[in-house]
Amino acid sequence: MIRLNSKIPDGPLARKWTSYKASVKLVNPANKKKIDIIVVGTGLSGASAASSLGELGYNVKVFCYQDSPRRAHSVAAQGGINAAKNYQNDGDSVYRLFYDMIKGGDFRAREANVYRAAEVSNQVIDHFTAIGVPFARDYGGTLDTRSFGGVQVSRTFYAKGQTGQQCLLGCYSSLNRQIKKGTVKMFPRREMLDLVVIDGRARGIITRNLVTGEIERHSAHAVVLATGGYGTIYYLSTLAVNSNASAAWKAHKKGACFANPSFVQIHPTCVPQLNEFQSKLTLMSESLRNDGRVWVPRTKGDKRPANDIPEEERDYYLERRYPAYGNLVPRDVGSRAAKERCDAGYGVGDTGLAVYLDFRDAINKQGKKAIESKYGNLFELYKTITGKDPYEEPMMIYPAGHYTMGGLWVDYELMTTIPGLYAIGESNFSDHGANRLGASSLMQAAGDGYFILPVTINNYLADQIRVPKIPTDSPEFEEAEKSARERLAKLISIKGKQTASSFHKRLGKIMWDYCGMTRNEEGLKKALVLVKELKKEFWSDLNVPGTINELNQELEKAGRVADYFELAELLITDAIERKESCGAHFREEYQTPDGEALRNDKEFAYVAVWEYAGEGKPHILHKEELKFEEVEMKERSYK
Amino acid sequence: MKLTLKIWRQKDARAKGSFVTYHMDNVSPEMSFLEMMDALNKKLVEEDKDPVAFDHDCREGICGSCGMYINGHPHGPVPGVTTCHLSMRYFNDGDTIWVEPWRAKPFPVIRDLIVDRSAFDKIQVAGGFISVNAGAAPEANSIPVRKKNADEAFDSAICIGCGACVAACKNASAMLFVSAKISQFALLPQGRVEAKDRVRAMVEKMDELGFGNCSNTGACEAACPKKIKLTNIARLNREYYKAY
Amino acid sequence: MNKILFSSISKKFVMALAGLFLIVFLPVHLSINLMLLKPDPEPFNRAAHFMATFPLVKIVEVILILAILVHISWGIYLQIQNWLARPQGYVVKIKTRTSFFSRFMIWTGASVLTFLIIHFTNFYFIRLGLVEGNPENFYGVAHSLFKIPAYNYIYLVCFILLGLHLYHAFSSAFQTLGLNHRLWTPVVKVVALIYAIVIPLGFAVISITIWQFR
């Protein structure tokens, strides 16, 4: 039975991090050389953590499934990265950034962690600038910012629509520097198959070389997971198609608790599904809603081309339902409203799962040039994907799974419930509560990797300096490798008829229909049954051609989908258990008379922390009560 | 649409590869090229045959994983897009499409259409960074950068490292790739400190890995899905001369 | 030191410098050749004699020979490396849009080399006494050569190929030397085009005039 200890330092909120740093244990440079650390994942958090730990002098081994660390999906983040620099003199501060995040997360995040994330945000910007990230600048040569995600200050630093790419390449460059120095060793095209726990401590991982199929053992004094989110559980999402939860899930099954799995952000403005083979939904920056009007036809199943539908037969449903905010309602409201119209049969496009985002009026009013200067690259992207010109006809958009606020539970030191196992970036349940604000994921991931983990990990490693290099021939490694091999062999031996992707797609559909933007108890319970049935079918009718000992992409997919079946059950269970609506988790039973989320602070102001109890046994729920010392829990109102 | 695909199949690095012909019915013009490949692979797996291996990940043109040489064009015939963004509406019913892996000595084939591009990482490891430790950075606004330079540095920095420049160059030269990184840092005051060591190290590594020499044909620029400019190569040359 | 001299960029640098030197030399050569059009052989022979004996020109001549040798040998060296960089080619030839003539530099260069060998046999080696002929009357040698139709055909084909070589070479040399400018590079390209037409045309006009009208 696990006992949760969030290890929040004493003292006033604003002093916690400072006093923690002042009292944390240190490891002297000579001893650091003797300590090995494994980092899994090379996105913003993984690459920054690995390079920083290398800079400190630890021996770091880094793993990623892609052919190069530069391809991790942080690369696709568009909008920007927040920091409380107050360069605009608009009254911003660390406290304000903290408050926006805690409120944006609908009061389901840990106060001390969120405050710290806001606190290190400025250091992150300084560091990125120093290592050559080409952020946008003003004519005077200083950094430019823009406002983002409905906050009242301008605190988002950006590099056009490719901020994630530029920040990731920055982290990749610091990683390269350490690789050259020899402090970091890079292992690309490796998939983590299991975590090795020895005497209750994380001591290594089992990996598969994705080129040769070789199963490898790697040991270390500590293991850091930076493996991202699980948004591809919906099959179609804004994530990279190979993004997966397997590493985190394997750690979970070895004792790391999983927190708030049902908190998944659905982004309202994505290019909708165009064909049944579609593998991916591409995000269109939500800034488009500043000038675009969202509508559907007034008549059900109206198949006329958008431009042939006269004004009086259009239903500008956001403007109708939310006259105060109109098209600028928050993400979750916009997503739910689109779903409501499409479910009612008013959706457009071949699938009926899309709504129009129309720039006709804006173009008429401001001229094509003005619209082009604001959104030219996005219009271009839309045209590349769909072949349709948004200057001539309205865009079609639909919500898509985007970011997972849930993840491995970590304490203030970012350590999971397994001593020596850390989770950073999107892979932990982190600082975003039940809903993430725009431009805060890059901020948190880089903050974790550059400035938080390299401090907190010392506290654990200080006690490890007398532990010699961990041998990889212990029974624990033996056993972990054996079970990993058996599982791969099992997947290959089914020899059924269906592909892993086709199962993934069906799983995604169940999750999307019953555990997506809105949820209700009946649907969730039905989903649980459906997932279990599908899982059974998976294990009896999957086909994976080829062998284990070669490059086998079907085998990779199959392993990931198999884990998703298990995670799906937990995600649904968590959604059933949380009998309130908060942030991205909207339970239809719990809403205000006008359809807004109805939080229940009395009973649910906690982090749901799930412990794995063994194959076939129900998960054990632990609750980390959320205490708010500094802020008062309020209703998020947009009307 | 009905299509005939001629795809390079090669079991592993040592095996001798060959083209295999596949026939695809019911290709929707709304599919992307990779989705068409997914459909082919689904068919193959259902027939218990080995699917075609290819690299891909983000499927939104930014990670740089995908890359196929399609009918004589890296990333296909449409300029400015990656393979994952190449729409099937640019092909016609009855077309025969030849799909080959990137070809270059430093990019050996791993399997089918997957090549090993770690040479690019090695070049970046040689010097593609600014040596500042976490925690050592000065206040961000203490280093002013002329807007024009910052914008130009950004335009060079958007390289996705896909390798299309090498694939398109008749000499398999990596100059556009290297010059993009060199330019990004050369244009920023932060990067100037190490400019000389960086350009020497990166060019030396590039040569050592067996890439060809630049003969200013401009194929790289034309094939680049991110439209990285040839002017970067001139800047790389300049930076190189300045380093001695 | 080896790394510096033999890096890909340094090799290209040397190629470009040598090439630019040859580009400067060609108009000088052409201006002397224009004297072939005069009915009086004296001015041409005097110019040829001057070029053969004046000490300063002697020095330049050494540089010129070096430039030619370096340009050729480096060119072949680079080309071999380029071929080795793609041991297995594509089945469908690369269709990516490129500056067209840049693809054939080794071949246009090779044909120019063939011509140079013939040219040297006819003139330079005479002067050195390696080949028979009258070094005091190059005017006469030239005129008699241009009366041979086959010689003219070879001469003309080679100069067309030289033009193609020069067209890419001219602007490419600037790019290699790192001189690429938003405003000036387009100008260089136009100059390159003019140069690549005018120089070969000049030589061709001389040979055709002598062949047909003298």
Image (cartoon, coloured by chain):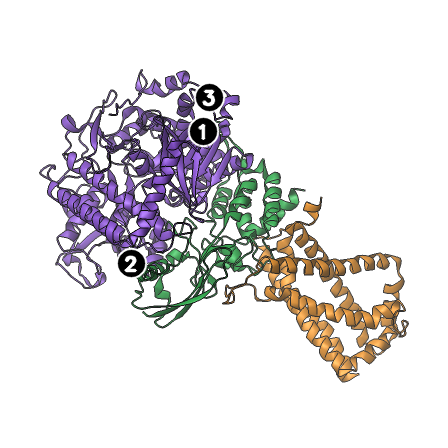
Q: Residue farthest to the left?
A: A593
Q: Secondary structure at mark 3?
A: loop
Q: Residues within 10 Å of mark 3 (few under 14, many from 20)?
A: some
Q: Dot 1 corresponds to which residue?
A: A470
> Are both tags, 1 and 3, on one chain?
yes
Quadrant placement of the N terminus of chain A:
top left
Q: Is residue A132 visible?
A: no
Q: CA distance from mark 1 to mark 2?
A: 46 Å
Q: Marks 2 and 1: in contact by CB < 8 Å?
A: no
Which labelled disc corresponds to residue A465? 3
Mark 1 or 3, nearer chain start? 3
Q: Relative to residue B237, is residue B89 depicted above or below?
A: below
* Residue displayed at 61% across by 58% down: C84
Mark 3 or 2, nearer chain start? 2
Q: Position of residue A216 (x, y in %)?
A: 43, 40
Which is nearer the eye, A56 or A151? A56
Q: Mark 1 falls within which chain?
A: A
Q: Is residue A21 visible?
A: yes
Q: Colour of chain A?
A: purple
Q: Dot 2 corresponds to which residue?
A: A277
Left or right: where A493 falls relative to C200? left
